[in-house]
Amino acid sequence: MMTRYKMKMTYDGHLFHGFQIQPNQRTVQGEIEKALLKMTKGQRVVVHGSGRTDAGVHAKGQVIHFDYPGKIPAKNMMMALNSLMPRDILFTESEIVDKDFHVQYSTKGKWYRYIVDQHHFTDPFKRFYTGHYPYPVEIEKMKIAAQDLLGEHDFTSFAASGGQIIDKVRTIYYVNIESKPEDKEIVFDFIGNGFLYNMVRIMVGALLEIGNGKRPVHDLQRVIAAKDRQEVRTTAPASGLYLYHVFYDEVPEKYRLDKKKH
């Protein structure tokens, strides 16, 4: 009897070569499957993730599912896996779900957070967990510019060349930018129905350039219309990116700013 488990997890991506399993590389999927192999005494269990975070990218709310040969109470499954995990992975929620649930195809939206450190020099205790941008920026300019990302657009200009997906149309529901002067940080939040390869990091790079005055406030309108990756060459570092939350119910109305604009 196979039982499908849906589990929420958090991980520090610094020492991982991304989520997806790769030969001779330490990956999040690889660590989980290695633990499940011990639990099943040699029977491989394939782990599916809601998104394939890149090397150095972190997660506060990654979600996985897998089919396990046998039935263990959901709480016990979480405790068993946590006891076998390295210290940079922790499972926080676990439930048994129907076989028609798929962690990737059942999603209604994703929330990514990006944190920028603005100290003049790189803070050694933040270097693996933030992007670094020491130049002055105007937060209000970036907030105005971010409104141009809301709604459904072809985001070809914000997709890195390594992506495999042909359809570049996505809908951004919510963008929020907050300054935290006490920490010398800027926090960017993006919620959408899906994101392309490096899309969030490229959007952050463009918004920082607007905040710094290198681009006009509404330049993103032109960039989106151009459908040309060469229009935004800056990609913020992986270290500042977090997969913050995955929505499996409809994205709440308070995060649907796109409806107010369009």
Image (cartoon, rainbow, N blue to C red):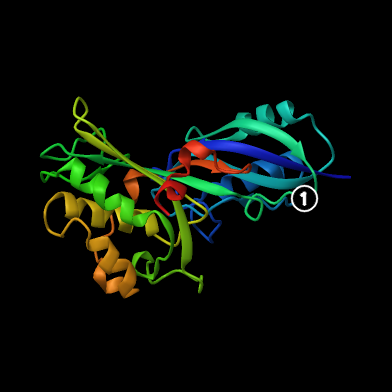
Foreground residue among 49 and 228:
228
- Inspect the image, locate mark 1, and give the three-letter code of the amino acid beneath it: Gln
Q: Which residue is drawn at 71% across and 26% down?
A: 75
Q: Where is residue 188 in the image (x, y as percent from the top left)?
A: 32, 42
Residue 137: which quarter of the image? top left
Foreground residue among 180 and 121:
180
Q: Which residue is drawn at 25% across and 41% down?
A: 116
Q: Position of residue 24 (x, y in %)?
A: 51, 59
Residue 161: which quarter of the image? bottom left
Q: Where is residue 156 in the image (x, y as percent from the top left)?
A: 39, 70
| Residue 48 visible, this angle | yes
* Disc 1 element: loop
Q: Is 258 on the left-hand or right-hand side of 218?
A: right
- In the rendered view, tell whether residue 217 sits above or below residue 112: below
Q: Residue at x 49, y 32 (%)?
A: 87
Estimate how packed mark 1 is, as few (under 14), some (14 to 19) or many (20 or more) residues with alpha carbons within 10 Å. Answer: few
Q: Furthest residue to the right?
A: 1
Q: Which image quarter holds the N terminus?
A: top right
Q: Which residue is drawn at 33% across and 46% down?
A: 239
Q: Position of residue 241 (x, y in %)?
A: 37, 46
* Disc 1 target residue: 43
Q: Which image quarter holds the C terminus?
A: bottom left
Q: Is 244 on the left-hand or right-hand side of 149?
A: right
- In the rendered view, tell whether residue 202 sits above or below residue 127: below
| Residue 237 visible, this angle | no
Q: Is 142 on the left-hand or right-hand side of 191?
A: left
- The number of discs equals 1
Foreground residue among 72 and 101:
101
- In the rendered view, tell whether residue 167 sits above or below residue 243: below
Foreground residue among 19 and 64:
64
